[in-house]
Image (cartoon, rainbow, N blue to C red):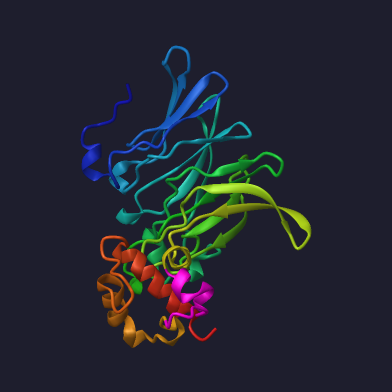
Amino acid sequence: MIEYPPDTTRVVCCGIVNRGAALFEDRLYRTTLDAHVIALDIKTGKEVWRTKSSDPKDGYSMTVAPLLANGVVIAGVAGAQFGHRGYLEGFDAQTGKPLWRTYTIPAPGEPGSETWAGESMKTGGGSTWITGSYDPDLDLVFWGTGNPAPWNPLGRKGDNLYTNSILAIQPKTGNVVWWYQMTPNDPFDYDGINELVQAELTIDGTPRKVVMQAVAAGAMVYADYCANCHGEQLRNTSAGGTSDLRRLRSADRDRFFSVVLNGKSQMPPWRGVLQLRQIESVWAYIRANVDR
């Protein structure tokens, strides 16, 4: 049985959740809600080692399933809504000794800190609560990062690196080899945390290793619910007289929401089908692509 102090549930974000475990040789690895990483003997269930990563009173919790990569146990944290600095941490699989910690939010003066206003990076969020994936050929771990904190972006103007991003990390050192940000200055809690799928695709006639992620951004919602009538990439190819969304301006926001929620003419109401943040994401996608 995994135990943690009873007051843990009073302070952690965001729910009493555990997303699974990892198996390696004769051990099972998992995290605990009070931000410990533990190894259990797979045959007896006895605890082999337990390492404290952070304190829940500082806004951190762990719900993630660890990832084993090149002999290193890698785990991330939850709790961006409480204004922590997110990170990934690597532990020796045999002993539990911490090997490295890589923050997803730069400290003042570090590369990327210029994408935060003032000292807002000190409480910048960037959680890592969904397990990444590992390419043993490249010896790289790919991991997504979550939303910046707080949700209101007015006090953290800038791109807010490295939130809503994919990080490619060396598992032995924690060094970031490359990164890609999907949603700069995310004001809608889109996250960039979702599972990362590796594949080999032929692009322009050349086989390439790729990593793919489905993110909760407006382009995907638009493709699923809007493109059939309004055309791909806002290009209105329908013969049915549907509105050309490229004509929408910022002043049309309230009217857009009303039409989507309540329906109009031949368009059915989407209330109860789409969440408000999904509609907001479509609006942001439209506004980002007008007149392109």
Residue plotted at (31% across, 55% down):
81
Where is residue 178? Give x, y as percent: 63, 57
Residue plotted at (33% across, 65% down):
277
| Residue extending farthest right | 205
Where is residue 149? Give x, y as percent: 36, 61
> How many callouts does the rendering have?
0
Closest to the observer: 128 or 265?
265
Corner quadrant of residue 70: top right
Q: Looking at the image, is 195 positioned above or below residue 20?
A: below
Q: Quadrant of the N terminus?
A: top left
Where is residue 6? Give x, y as percent: 21, 32
Q: Looking at the image, is 5 positioned above or below residue 160?
A: above
Residue plotted at (40% across, 71% down):
282
Where is residue 214? Give x, y as percent: 50, 55
| Residue extending farthest top | 44
The reply, left or right, for residue 169 in relation to residue 214 is right
Is 207 magenta? The answer is: no
Query: Is residue 133 something that shows in the picture?
Result: yes
Corner quadrant of residue 134: top right
Is 236 magenta? The answer is: yes
Q: Quadrant of the C terminus?
A: bottom right
Q: Looking at the image, is 63 positioned above or below residue 45?
A: below
Query: Is residue 106 something that shows in the picture?
Result: no
Stretch of the chain drawn in magenta:
226-241
